[in-house]
Image (cartoon, helix red, strand yellow):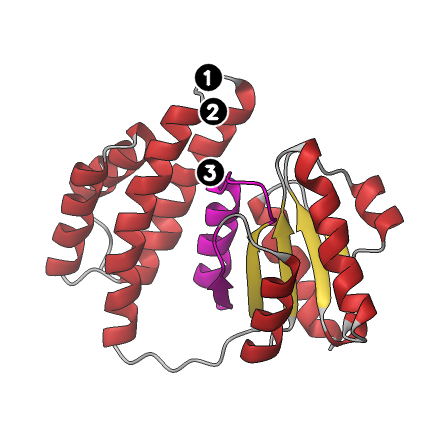
Amino acid sequence: MSIPESIRERLSQALIEGDADAAEAAALEALQADLDPLAVISEVMIPALTEVGNQFQCGDIFLPELMMAGEAAERVSKHLEAAIAAQGRTTTALGIVVMGTVQGDVHDIGKNIVATMLRAHGFKVVDLGRNVAPSKFLDAARANGADIVAMSTLMTTTRPQALNTLNLFREVGARDQYALIVGGGCVTETWANEAGFDGYSADAAGAVELCKKLVNKN
């Protein structure tokens, strides 16, 4: 069943405007109408969150609006993911990605967009949230049998924590067991390559393609 234009427009607008109540109501209406929750994620939620990210990068919106959009997306995601689980879908995940924003960094809108897109493309995502210590990345990778460990860092002051995490995996002899990737506003491909990461992406769509390539190598 295709998504009715009225639901599509209301959910998209609510996410972009960061209206969590309206977004949640539209998502629940979509589920009550027996719409495919994966279609709602891929056709409405991802484009809306991508637009929010683009607006932030262009300076059209600022951190408060970004955080409001993130809260709206989180409330919608809980309902959609619960509906997917309730349907008993048992498709094999393309891979397992443990991800989080590095220690000291509390920005997560970009990470949230990547997590949503990865799930929509068939990955199992273990999202550790914000301000994640290096040891927590390592513990989660081991506990979940991760294929990929993805780190996000938006601020130059927290970029060294991505290196600390990478170095911890090296120190304990676990570096070759996982693909470690990094992204965020303060990171460049040159820096990531020189530091020894397995990959970098400047945006969420690129992160999905990167993860697909990495799991296909294994």
User: Which residue matches tag 2?
Assistant: 55
For this rendering, which residue is in front, 101 or 214? 101
Q: Residue at x 60, y 56 (%)?
A: 133
Q: Quadrant of residue 147?
A: bottom right
Q: Which mark is residue 60?
A: 1
Q: Are marks 1 and 2 in contact (CB under 8 Å)?
A: yes
Q: Residues in magenta?
A: 102-129
Give residue 160's position: percent from left, percent from top: 75, 44
The label nearer to you, 3 versus 1, is: 1
Q: Which residue is mark 3?
A: 50
Is 203 placed above or below 77 here? above
Q: CA distance from mark 3 to mark 2?
A: 9 Å
Q: Is residue 125 above or below residue 13?
A: below
Q: Earlier in the sequence, mark 3 or mark 2?
A: 3
Q: Residue at the spot x=35%, y=53% of the render?
A: 41
Q: CA distance from mark 1 to mark 2?
A: 5 Å
User: In the picture, which quadrant includes the C terminus?
Assistant: bottom right
